[in-house]
Image (tube, rainbow, N blue to C red):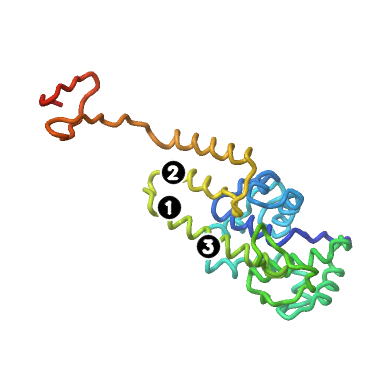
Amino acid sequence: MAKIDAPYAPGSNIAVALNAYRTGDLPTPPANEDLVRLGIPKGNAPRVVPTLKFLGLLDQVGRPTPTFEHLRVIPDENMPNALADVIKQAYAPVFRDLPVVSGASTDALTQVFGRHYGLEGQRERQVSLFRRLCVMAGLMSEEAPIRKPKAAITHGPTVISPPVETASQGAYEQGVTERKEREQVEQGVNSSDSRYRSLFSHVGELPQDGKWTKDKRDRWLNALTAMLDWSTDIVEPERQVAVNNHAQMPIRDGAVAESGDKLEV
């Protein structure tokens, strides 16, 4: 029997895609450029959709499945358990051999993956993705060892970076936090007026590290201007004239104010 190929996308990229779908920022079917716009590296983007298909979240043409829709609408506190069910179903052969994966070593997982999945050259990445998904779902602890990191991983100008095995968990928790913050901000706007929702989504595309090329910045500003033009109406302010010792009165267009005169408006 031919072995199927297990996915090997970085777990942090899958966390970004999951959160983007929950916040409405992931178009479907997702194209590689959509994923890059979310911050997923261009070289990793082609691995994301096959992973979501393997997990049963997208169908073969890239449309969201009922399972993915369920993950989109459930409360944040229910997300880990729901994700755990998805992982157990997608990786059923692994859980048949290792019913409890929380204490499984890398060697044990590698052997199980070798029995059931192809792409031997990507075995380490396959196991790494599985571990990171399990951490996100609460099936493994963050301290579960993958391998000794060769060097500290940094993101942008920051000095402190998460270890390799906790990167996906950090991305997932960051996405949950950003989603809650966005909901809190949107509560300050009339929820019946959908004109402003695109503005909130657009602000969410600002670079997290505060760095952009001039071209990207200009395109972002142009898009913002277009959204403002669409969502707001421009009105002319009433002109003010000084009357009777600095008193302010409105004046219509075409009227002429004489010193000391009373203007009828």
Residue 112, image quadrant: bottom right
What residue is shown at x 21% (from left), y 29% (from top)? Answer: 241
Q: What is the residue that sits farthest to the bottom in this orientation?
A: 103
Which residue has dot 1 on it?
Answer: 186
Compared to 46, does 227 lie above or below? above
Q: Which element is circle 3 on? A: helix
Which residue has dot 2 on it?
Answer: 196
> In the rendered view of the protein, which quadrant contains the C terminus?
top left
- Hey, what amino acid is under mark 3? Thr
Q: Pointers 1 and 2 in contact (CB under 8 A)?
A: yes
Q: Which element is circle 1 on? A: helix
Residue 76, numbered label: none
Residue 138 spot, x, y in % from top left: 63, 73
Which residue has dot 3 on it?
Answer: 177
Q: Judge the density around disc 3: few (<14), some (14-19), many (≥20) Cα neighbours within 10 Å.
A: few
How far apart in space, not on screen, are marks 1 and 3 (Cα)? 14 Å
What residue is shown at x 18% (from left), y 31% (from top)? Answer: 242
Residue 221 spot, x, y in % from top left: 54, 38
Say left or right for 236 vs 260. Answer: right
- Hey, what amino acid is under mark 1? Glu
The tag earlier along the polypeptide, 3 or 2, is 3
The tag earlier along the polypeptide, 1 or 3, is 3
